[in-house]
Image (tube, rainbow, N blue to C red):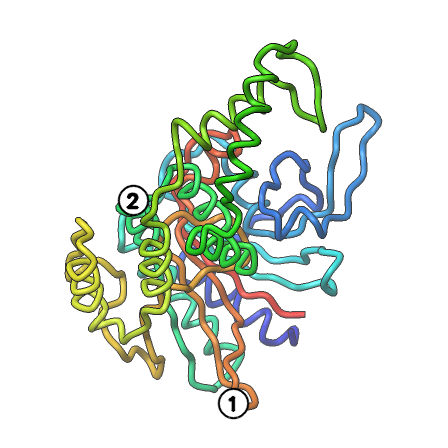
């Protein structure tokens, strides 16, 4: 990023009340949960044996630092610096976030400032895509599939390749062989006579028996897997102008007999055009960083007839609690350039 553009962005954010903070260069590895981040870390241990890594993402670093403060009123912060991952070059990142945020006005403010930032670096037309992970979760919870499969799908939606592999298995039952199950049942009863603490292939017999009991007896796969997989795929293909999104989603829920209601003011942006931006709802809008819990969005521009994503954001109300830190509702965005 040119230093001129860099300073323009920081100045614009400061004028909107966002205050600069300095981020630590390293992070305790225990706070990194997402697979897409974990496998690309530069890690090391300190003299006490605690595992650290160079920060792979500045948004996560920002949340951790803020969660450790005693600030409970609304705070608007901005940060900048480099993030480090083995699969990428060193990347410059600027972020802007609102902590202790409790309303949709903050969502709108973050998106509005995202548009401002985009305009500081290019005069090209922008494409704003908005999604919401709560909608996907609601669809999933309405379907008649085992809870363990719902959990696997929700946890792996960030990993598209594996996510669709799970869907395929659910749809075809190709990993579910009745003859093999009968053989496994015989082994199950034999293993019940063994020491439950004995380890086999890295797992205790007690754990193996519990997993088998859940899979076959307490939470068996239903014959509706194929239908449910098709509903999920159809939902993720929904893409429309933001103005039409509430109606199109309501029709989809009704057609598939899903008890989900959506208000006309559900999304923080309600117009198809805003400041030379095309705005659309995209059900499959999922960032590659596993931090968001509801609203997600991105901004792209056309490069060689293809859309190039340059900015991501969303709401991450549950992340701090999941990391063992104090609860902190937040919404934010970041622009990343090599």
| Viewer-side residue, 251 vs 275 | 251
Q: In the image, residue 152 lies at what x, y percent?
A: 47, 43
Label 2 Cα crowd, 10 Å radius (few <14 / some 14-19 / many 20+): some
The Cα–Cα distance between marks 2 and 1, rounded to whole angstroms, is 41 Å
Quadrant assignment for the C terminus? bottom right
Q: How many marks?
A: 2
- Observer-side mark, 2 or 1, equals 2
Q: Quadrant of residue 90?
A: bottom right
The residue indicated by pointer 2 is 144
Q: Residue furthest right?
A: 47
Identify the residue position indicated by label 1 in the image: 305
Residue at the far bottom: name it. Answer: 304
| Residue at (50% x, 30% y) in the render | 325
Q: Horizontal and vertical percent for residue 77?
A: 48, 51
| Horizontal arrangement in the rendering, residue 264 relative to residue 182 (left or right) | left
**In the depicted structure, whether residue 185 falls above or below residue 95:** above
Left or right of residue 120: residue 245: left
Please name whichever residue, 303 or 91, is drawn nearer the observer in this view of the structure.
Answer: 303
Residue at 49 percent across and 44 percent down: it is 176
């Amino acid at each position: 990023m040119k230093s001129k553009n860099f300073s323009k962005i920081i100045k614009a954010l400061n004028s909107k009340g966002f205050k600069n903070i300095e981020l630590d260069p390293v992070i305790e590895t225990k706070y990194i949960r997402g697979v897409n981040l974990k496998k690309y870390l530069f890690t090391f241990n300190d003299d006490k044996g605690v595992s650290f890594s160079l920060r792979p993402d500045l948004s996560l670093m920002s949340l951790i630092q803020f969660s450790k403060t005693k600030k409970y009123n609304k705070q608007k912060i901005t940060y900048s610096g480099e993030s480090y991952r083995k699969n990428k070059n060193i990347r410059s990142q600027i972020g802007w976030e609102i902590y202790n945020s409790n309303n949709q006005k903050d969502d709108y403010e973050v998106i509005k400032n995202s548009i401002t930032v985009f305009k500081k670096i290019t005069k090209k037309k922008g494409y704003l895509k908005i999604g919401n992970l709560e909608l996907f979760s609601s669809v999933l919870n309405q379907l008649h599939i085992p809870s363990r499969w719902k959990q696997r799908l929700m946890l792996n939606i960030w990993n598209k390749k594996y996510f669709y592999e799970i869907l395929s298995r659910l749809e075809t039952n190709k990993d579910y062989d009745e003859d093999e199950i009968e053989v496994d049942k015989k082994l199950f009863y034999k293993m019940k006579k063994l020491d439950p603490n004995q380890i086999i292939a890295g797992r205790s017999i007690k754990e193996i028996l519990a997993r088998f009991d859940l899979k076959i007896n307490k939470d068996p796969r239903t014959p509706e897997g194929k239908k449910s997989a098709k509903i999920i795929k159809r939902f993720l293909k929904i893409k429309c102008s933001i103005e039409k999104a509430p109606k199109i989603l309501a029709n989809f829920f009704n057609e598939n007999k899903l008890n989900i209601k959506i208000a006309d003011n559900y999304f923080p942006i309600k117009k198809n055009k805003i400041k030379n931006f095309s705005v659309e709802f995209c059900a499959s809008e999922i960032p590659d960083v596993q931090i968001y819990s509801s609203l997600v969005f991105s901004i792209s521009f056309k490069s060689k007839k293809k859309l190039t994503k340059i900015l991501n954001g969303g709401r991450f109300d549950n992340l701090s609690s999941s990391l063992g830190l104090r609860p902190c509702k937040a919404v934010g965005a970041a622009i990343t350039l090599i």
